[in-house]
Amino acid sequence: MPRDAELTKQRIFDAATAEFAGHGVAGARIDRIASSASANKQLIYAYFGSKRQLFEAVVSEHVRRFHDQVPFDPERLPEYAAAAFDYFTEHPEAMHLGSWHSLEPGETNHRIPVIERAIRTRSRLVSRAQAAGAVDRSIAPVDLLALLTAIASAWAMATPERNPRGGASVRIQARRRAAVVELARRLVDPR
Amino acid sequence: MPRDAELTKQRIFDAATAEFAGHGVAGARIDRIASSASANKQLIYAYFGSKRQLFEAVVSEHVRRFHDQVPFDPERLPEYAAAAFDYFTEHPEAMHLGSWHSLEPGETNHRIPVIERAIRTRSRLVSRAQAAGAVDRSIAPVDLLALLTAIASAWAMATPERNPRGGASVRIQARRRAAVVELARRLVDPR
């Protein structure tokens, strides 16, 4: 792809991230994305297909970035939970995209392949770590992963009553992070 | 209030619950609520004020129902987590209302009093239970409560990839519930 087209595609991606994170799929408007990216609306459809397909492309790319930056090691799950907590804190837009995907009625029947694959692969890795005695066996791998994600994202997904305007102080963030690590440890440490 | 007005208000409340649970605050339309409740649009504004005020009234009432049906006992927190898990499973609309409240940018500065009060009261109760030695002390009360809620709602808030279309089987639900109780126990049991 020529350099110019690369740059345009990148601008569309960034504008779409902001638009979908703020408004969800139903609420997002392609003409706002086009205007914010200084791109032609028809070009967006040509590159990405429908609005729903653009959403899926954006979510998939954010999931890949998360996987790149927060490596998954089944024998170091508390450290993974801490890194995920940090990532969600620093990238609220990634968290928001996932929330819209969970929440919007139109998403119920849309499973995103990169997320499905990650759940499958990670469940197998946890299962092996359980068999090797490195992870507690009393909770099924797929459930253990769901709980680990819930712990790491407890504050990223919380209502405004738990999340002070302007974000938590450094002290409170550190206290929450330590609580995440401690509970993750209790979830996975062999007993 | 006369009986007829009571019934109309109830119909508006039910229609508003469905509309907000499905579309959020920004996406909800008062005329759809009016039509579904067979009520006059002006009457809705007269009873509840703005669309945002109607949303807050609906969320507050659902929080009160949750508090009524899932009693909070700081000395029986794993049982509380199990009951909350059951409630979220049976009342996805209540969960969805809370998710929109957490997610929509317009909600950031709207704290809902009944939620704020519950967090304050429950933090005090947990703090006392910690002082009495009934609850583990290593995690701050307000953080312990946030984690407990995250555990109990892990699947109610999950993406479609974790939540099979048509809901989980009885067997899977029972397995998840047992995992919630087990992790809640590890969170709160004094060590």
Image (cartoon, coloured by chain):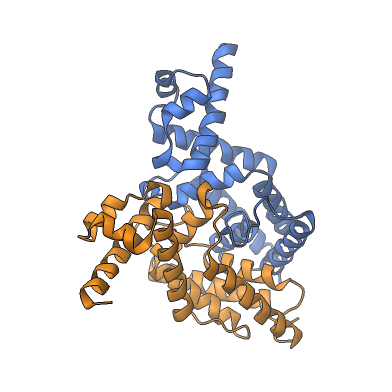
Chain colours: A orange, B blue
Say whether residue B139 is visible: no
Residue A80 versus residue A121: which sits nearer the camera?
Answer: A121
Q: Is residue A179 above or below residue B160?
A: below
Compared to residue B124, the image places residue A120 above or below, namely below
Kindly identify the residue that appears in the image at 62 percent across and 77 percent down: A122
Q: Position of residue B74 (x, y in %)?
A: 68, 55
Q: Position of residue B112 (x, y in %)?
A: 46, 43
Quarter containing the C terminus of chain A: bottom right
Q: Nearer the viewer, residue B69 or A109?
A: A109
**How far across and down, in percent of the image, does residue A158 sit?**
49, 56
Q: Position of residue A177 (x, y in %)?
A: 50, 73
Q: Is residue B54 visible?
A: yes
The residue shown at (28%, 77%) is A1
Q: With A147 as the anchor, is A114 left or right in this view?
A: left
Which of the 4 image quarters holds residue A47?
A: bottom left
Whether B67 is drawn above or below A61: the answer is above
Question: Residue A168 vs residue B146: left or right?
Answer: left
